[in-house]
Amino acid sequence: MTSLTETDHGAASREEGARQVRAVPRWRRGLRPYLLIVPALLLTGGILYPFGLGLYYTLFDFSASKPQPDMVGFENYRTVFTQEAFWNSAWVTVLYAVGAAAVETVLGVAVALLLHRSSLIGRVLEKILILPLMIAPVIAAIIWKLMLQPSVGVINHLLKPFGLGGVQWTDTPTGALLSSIAVDVWVYTPFVAILALAGLRSLPTSPFEAAAVDGAGWWYTFRRLTLPMLWPYVLVAVIFRFMDSLKVFDIIYALTEGGPGDSTVVLQIRAYLEAIRFQRYSFGISYTIVLWAVVYLAAMVLVRYLGRLQNRAAEVSK
Amino acid sequence: MDMHVHDRRRFLALAAAAATAPLLTACGAGFGGDDKKNDGSAAADVTGSFDWKREKGKTVKALLNKHPYTDALIADLKSFTEKTGIKVEYDVFPEDNYFDKLTVDLSSGRASYDVFMLGAYMVWQYGPPGWLEDLGPWMRNSSATGDEWDQADFFPNLLQADQWSLKAGAPLGQGGQYALPWGWETNVVAYNTEVFKKLGLKPAESFDELREVASVIKKKAPDAGFDGMYGIAVRGSRSWATIHPGFMTMYARNGLKDFTVTDGKLKPAMNTPEASAFTQDWAGMVKQGGPPSWTSYTWYQCSSDLGAKKAGMLFDADTAAYFQAVKGASPASGKIAFHPGPKGPDGSLATNMWIWSLGMNAKSKKKSAAWLFLQWATGKEHLRKGAITYNHIDPVRKSISQDGAYKDKMRHLEGFIDTFEAVVDQTKIQFTPQAQFFDATTSWASALQEIYGGKNAESVLNGLASDLATKVS
């Protein structure tokens, strides 16, 4: 009797549960998965809509002097690729991005290695190191512009005792490009250092202990152990910095405005001048679309390489 | 199950279509252009007798550039509100990004600002797309414009500088009045009297002399007690603003043109042998007697170097020197004198000018109130107060330039009034009006930097001319 009652009770609760499930109409249950993807759809739409619109505009001859434009197909792209100015800007952009990313990687890893050795100075430096990242790049560029000023800037003042007080940092094409890279390095090396430091701290200790027991020197350990194990972390930093440097605008514009001549007119500055200053909207957007394609391809190659590295590391650790 | 999958697919297809639909609709809407074309001016709606209180209770929004002239306007705004009952709200931006802000705002087709400051060159860019209200009908309507505004009192070359037919290459002074002159600047030489006296120099009367004097100052001034002084401050940044003051003035005095116009077609002329030789000499002058880091020089640096006794001369806007010359403004104040600058080979004092003008947004919803504001801001009463009480110098009105109180105020600045009077009639816009002005002059500044860096002027300018030929044709 008791068991019967329990069985009845169990059946009743199952029935109750089933009633509750049934209480949510089937169409609502069916709608749930779609509701869940709504934020993702909105986000994707928010990204794709302006992008698609921009892409669409590049097919027209649209400028302030032609507010009702004609469809010109791929004419804007043809003009971009046949312009000497474009190839000059593309070359400057690549030089800048490779130069900045390379120097930042080497310096960032070096700084991380120094900070990894726990000491009071290291801990203090760690706090100071992050300061440039807290300054907007455009402000950093203005500060550096003042410091690099030949007659009143502090850099030439400091170099004066060494007989180098008259350097005109941004007045020559090479000087302007190197100065811009230097500011980028000043701002972003800490970013690479922080990522590399996080990587160093996550490495297993046993291979290093074994190497120490075998009497391996610092350089050998760095080359054969530290760097290969750290490389995936470094590569993440390189990907970020390389992509960001390809898209640079603020630092160069505030420091040199693209000059002297066209020596520091990177693709972003060219796009800004065309679209905003000269109001050739379609043509300016074409520049940004080309830049987007370059960044996309570069990122794809680097990310694939990173993926292969991570797979290899996963196989090694199995 | 299959049905479920099919539903999801259909849903995704519908969602994609829904996302694409507004995109296509927006694209088809015609790039944000205005749909309703109205050729009739809103000025025709103003009838009856003229009344300052006509738009009482309204608010006008103004976009302003940070400038001493703006400071004078803001300081006197209370008078406008008392006179009209109209409130003025304003935003002020520094010059570095002022024009970008204005361009983006106007091109958006909104009426965020009813009135704004602009230069005459901007009329060539903002006029053709229809962003500027033609003020001609307002000026001609006696119901909208009071008698005391007195159009004939403006220097005619200033009023004409803001008039254009919107056709590339067509001369100024014809067509619509797209802005009103409000404050202007003429380009002259200002010099440090102390260093000139000590080195026994006289203001240059020819371009060759100017180059010589600049070079002598750079060589000799530091040993004569002027530590770090160089010869001549001129602009050098990679911007259109580098071309229009001293460079274009001297260029025009040498009888040179930026473009030639044949049958309404523009042809770049900055690469003629004479223009190439002049440009090479100008770059040489900067190299021999100009500032270090010249390629980053804007008028701010030029002006402050003259005031800080770093520059022996300044070839730029007279106002750039004036703000350093007034009592207590800088270490060089009281020791700055003015001179019209070198004459051309034929004695020409042709001078390029800059006009701070005031314009009205063609999309403004408060055009009548905005016009009252423009009328007041360019009227005798405010401009006289600006010139005498504040630093709104270089009057756009003849009556103020002849006003005793104004002359008394400017008299203590050595050579200012004489210089102003020597160049005023020959000062006009020396450029050829065309919509690609900013591209042409930015590229020209870039070419000038390359020549300064050692490249051959002829080949650089030939490259510039061939690039511009396709853009302006």
Image: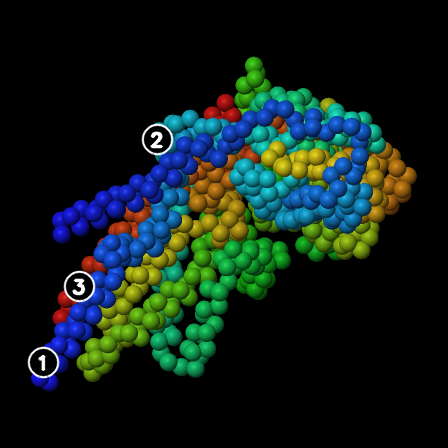
In the image: residue B410, left or right of residue A31: right
The first of marks 2 and 3 along the sequence is: 2
Above or below: residue A194 compared with residue B79? below
Mark 3 → mark 1, Cα distance in angstroms: 62 Å
Label 3: chain letter:
A
- Image x and y of residue A6, in percent: 13, 81
Q: Nearer the viewer, mark 3 or mark 1?
A: 1
Query: Which residue matches tag 1?
Result: A4
Q: Residue furthest front?
A: A1
Q: Residue furthest top?
A: B263
**Tag 1 and tag 2, C-beta contact below 8 Å:** no
Of B300 and A136, which appears nearest the observer? A136
Query: Residue B434's image quarter?
Result: top right
- Image x and y of residue B118, in percent: 65, 38
**Amino acid type at mark 1:** Leu
Of B382 and A106, which appears nearest the observer? B382
Counting the numbered discs, the total is 3
Query: Which residue matches tag 3?
Result: A312
Label 2: chain letter:
A
**Amino acid type at mark 2:** Phe
The kind of secondary structure element at disc 2 is loop
The answer to whether residue B51 is visible is yes
Query: Which residue matches tag 2?
Result: A74
Mark 1 → mark 2, Cα distance in angstroms: 81 Å
The kind of secondary structure element at disc 1 is helix
In the image: residue A276, left or right of residue A204: right
In the image: residue B58, left or right of residue B273: right
- Image x and y of residue B80, in percent: 78, 44
